[in-house]
Image: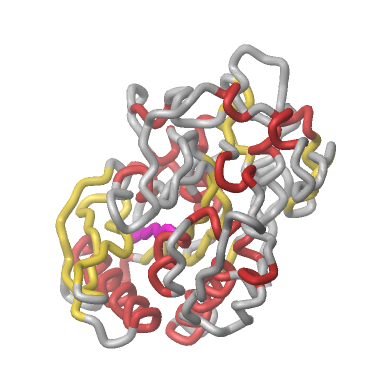
């Protein structure tokens, strides 16, 4: 069962690996984007397939009004078309490819760690700039903070760009092993592999000094070894007996940092990014004597490979010829193509 936090965590009145390593293993999102006028609500409302934009949503027990997100504010760049996605939560639909994949990952962690990992999949996507960037050590001048890349509600509030936005608060609240899944938002143009709304999962595990001291290795080596063992098992759980390799990389929030690649369908595929959490993040969360690891993965990227879904926009289709192809617990059922021209709304293919 998903665990919801109190409203004060992420909603106010008014897995950051994907930001750095989304060349291949997650859906690639560029920093360029058309102006927000391209997301005109008038375009959307003219299509019968889409329900009218509701004025109030409820996510994780938190009511979110349209005026809380789409504002007449010079710093606001959130259109109605993006607001309309806030309550859809594809990752919580057990018969949807995104939900099926999420549950398969949950199954691996439950069996491997005897249900020790807390699971959060209903956290409010409206977060502060501090939570989204500062708490995970994103540099003040990084391009991801720009209005061309991020949806700003106001100067201090955004739609989360990654599930890492909840990491620091969960650590401060005492969670030491957890998975966070959610819809995330980044401004971008649309094509078969790009969409401004997608889904991520982040995992974190914290260790106490006695755990690595008993092993006879230093804290960083202990955490890195445990991390690799965990994620190699996850890759086998999802893809079977595949060849794997680890690639050293750089993220500002982990050190050392790695990418996991698998040899699948006759090519190397980047699966996820991960690393040993920077001590500064743990220190700010009151865990000065601990060490931790973290990983982040894009659910669409993996689901497109596992289900052989050729276009990211199909995940948002309400056409029963798409939705009826998938069943709860059936990971990797191969998608059977159908004509999109007649049955899929033009909005789906051109929206933001």
Quarter where residue 240 is shown = bottom left
Side of 254 where 350 appears, left or right: right
Res. 15 in view = no
Picture coordinates of residue 151, whole percent (x, y): 55, 31
Res. 163 in view = yes
Side of 273 where 120 appears, left or right: right
Quarter where residue 118 is shown = bottom right
Q: Which residue sits at x=80%, y=47%?
A: 51
Q: Is residue 88 magenta?
A: no
Magenta stretch in the rendered image? 291-298
Depth check, front residue: 35 or 124: 35
| Chief secondary structure of the magenta portion | strand
Side of 181 where 260 appears, left or right: left
Q: Which residue sits at x=57%, y=58%?
A: 340
Depth check, front residue: 163 or 40: 40
| Image quadrant containing the C terminus | top right
Picture coordinates of residue 42, whole percent (x, y): 73, 28
| Relative height, residue 244 to residue 249 (above, below) | below
Picture coordinates of residue 25, whole percent (x, y): 32, 58
Picture coordinates of residue 300, whole percent (x, y): 47, 60
């Amino acid at each position: 069962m998903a665990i919801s936090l109190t409203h004060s965590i992420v909603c106010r009145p008014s897995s950051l690996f994907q930001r750095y390593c989304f060349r291949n293993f997650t859906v690639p999102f560029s920093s360029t984007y058309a102006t927000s006028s391209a997301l005109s609500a008038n375009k959307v409302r003219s299509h019968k397939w889409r329900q009218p934009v509701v004025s109030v949503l409820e996510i994780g027990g938190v009511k979110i009004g349209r005026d809380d997100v789409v504002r007449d504010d010079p710093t606001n760049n959130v259109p109605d078309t993006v607001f309309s996605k806030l309550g859809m939560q594809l990752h919580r639909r057990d018969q949807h490819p995104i939900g099926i994949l999420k549950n398969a990952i949950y199954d691996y962690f439950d069996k491997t760690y005897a249900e020790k990992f807390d699971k959060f999949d209903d956290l409010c996507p409206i977060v502060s700039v501090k939570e989204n960037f500062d708490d995970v050590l994103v540099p003040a001048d990084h391009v991801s903070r720009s209005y061309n890349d991020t949806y700003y509600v106001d100067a201090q509030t955004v739609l989360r760009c990654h599930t890492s936005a909840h990491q620091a608060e969960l650590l401060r609240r005492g969670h030491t092993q957890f998975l966070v899944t959610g819809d995330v938002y980044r401004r971008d143009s649309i094509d078969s592999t790009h969409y401004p709304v997608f889904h991520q999962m982040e995992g974190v595990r914290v260790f106490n000094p006695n755990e690595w001291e008993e092993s006879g290795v230093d804290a960083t080596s202990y955490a890195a070894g445990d991390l690799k063992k965990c994620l190699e098992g996850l890759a086998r759980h999802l893809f079977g007996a595949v060849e794997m390799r680890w690639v050293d990389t750089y993220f500002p929030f982990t050190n050392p940092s790695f990418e996991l690649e698998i040899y699948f369908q006759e090519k190397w595929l980047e699966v996820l990014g991960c690393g040993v959490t920077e001590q500064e993040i743990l220190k700010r969360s009151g865990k000065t004597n601990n060490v931790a690891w973290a990983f982040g993965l894009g659910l669409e990227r993996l689901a497109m490979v596992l289900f052989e879904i050729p276009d990211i926009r199909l995940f948002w289709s309400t056409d029963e010829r798409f939705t009826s192809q998938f069943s709860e617990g059936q990971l990797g059922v191969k998608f059977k193509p159908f004509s999109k021209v007649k049955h899929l709304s033009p909005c789906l293919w051109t929206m933001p």
